[in-house]
Image (cartoon, helix red, strand yellow):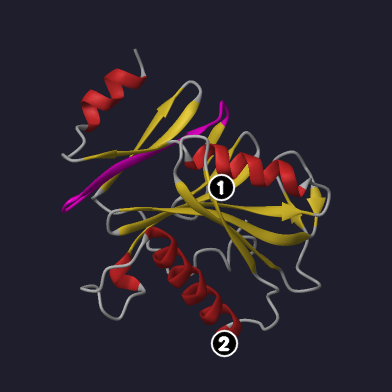
Amino acid sequence: MKKLFLLIFIFYSGLTNAQRLLGTPKSLILVYNYPNNHFYIEINGVEKSKTDRENVFIIDNRPIQILALNKSKFLKDTVLEFSSIDLMKIYINWEIDYIENNLFKNTNNKYEFLKTKKGRDIAFWTYDMPTGEPEIVTDSTRKTPTLKQMFVITRTKDFIVGLNSPLFGNEKYDEIKEYLITNIDGLVESDNEIDIYELDKQVNK
C-alpha cells in the first residue's frame, strides 16, 4: 500500500494532537480542533481499518486518504482573502506544480468545480499515474494497475479538506467520483471546539 499512496496529498502531515478518530457501526469520523477551526468529517463504511500510513484507511475495501491542510502551507500571503473556489484552485495548482516539477511530467490533470447535494462548493480533480505503475494487491486480492488518483476537496475557514481514492484498472470512474462527492458532504463545521466525548455519545447512541 505504500507505493499506492506515494503521490497522494504530498504535503499532508500525519495525525496530530489536534485530531481524533472515532468509529461508529456504519462510519469513520475524524475530528479536527485547531485554533478558530473546528470540524469533523464522517465517511460512510462498515468495514474499516487503518494502514501503516497516517490518515490512510481501508473503508469497505476501498483505500481512502483524508486531507486537512491549512492554507498557510500553500499561500505566500495568508492576509489576502480568496473565495472558496479561488482557494481550491490555488491549492490544486500548487500540488500539481510540485508533482510535475519533482516527480513526473504530463499528469494530464483535470478539475471541475461543483456543488454537492447539501450545496457545498467542491472541486473534483484527477491526474493520471505514470505508465507502468506497479500493480497493487488489495484486501480482496484484487491485482490491477493504478490508472488515476481521484480527489474531492472543499474549504472550511482556513483549511482545505479533502478525500482521495485511486482508480484501479477494473473499476468505474463515475462510481468512485460519486463516492467521493457523497462523502465530502459528511463534513461538519463548528464555531466552538468539538467535544470528542460528547460527539462519541451522540454518534454511538
Determine whether, in the image, residue 106 is placed left or right of residue 180: right
**Residue 151: % across, % down:** 57, 56
**Disc on the earlier residue, 2 or 1:** 1
For residue 201, above or below residue 110: above
- For label 2, the residue is 101
**Residue 136: % across, % down:** 74, 56
Mark 2 or 1: the one toward you? 2
- Secondary structure under tag 2 reads helix
Q: Give the range drawn in magenta.
A: 31-47
Looking at the image, which is closer to me, 129 or 55? 129
Name the residue at the top extreme. Answer: 205
- Asked if the stretch drawn in magenta spans residue 46, the answer is yes
Quadrant of the rendered structure where residue 7 is?
A: bottom right
Q: In the rendered image, which quarter contains the N terminus?
A: bottom right
**Residue 171: % across, % down:** 79, 46
Tell me what residue is drawn at x 49 percent, y 42 percent: 184
Looking at the image, which is closer to me, 27 or 161? 161
Residue type pointed to by label 1: Ile
Name the residue at the bottom extreme. Answer: 101
Instruction: For the residues labelled 2 and 1, say whether their Cβ atoms are less than 8 Å apart.
Output: no
Q: In the rendered image, which quarter contains the C terminus?
A: top left
**Residue 86: % across, % down:** 42, 67
At label 2, counting other C-alpha atoms closer than 10 Å, the crowd grade (few under 14, some 14-19, many 20 or more) is: few
Determine whether, in the image, residue 150 is placed left or right of residue 195: right
Looking at the image, which is closer to me, 177 or 114? 114
Tell me what residue is drawn at x 41 percent, y 29 percent: 23
- For label 1, the residue is 64
Determine whether, in the image, residue 189 is placed left or right of residue 107: left
At label 1, counting other C-alpha atoms closer than 10 Å, the crowd grade (few under 14, some 14-19, many 20 or more) is: many
- Secondary structure under tag 1 reads strand
Q: Main secondary structure of the magenta part?
A: strand
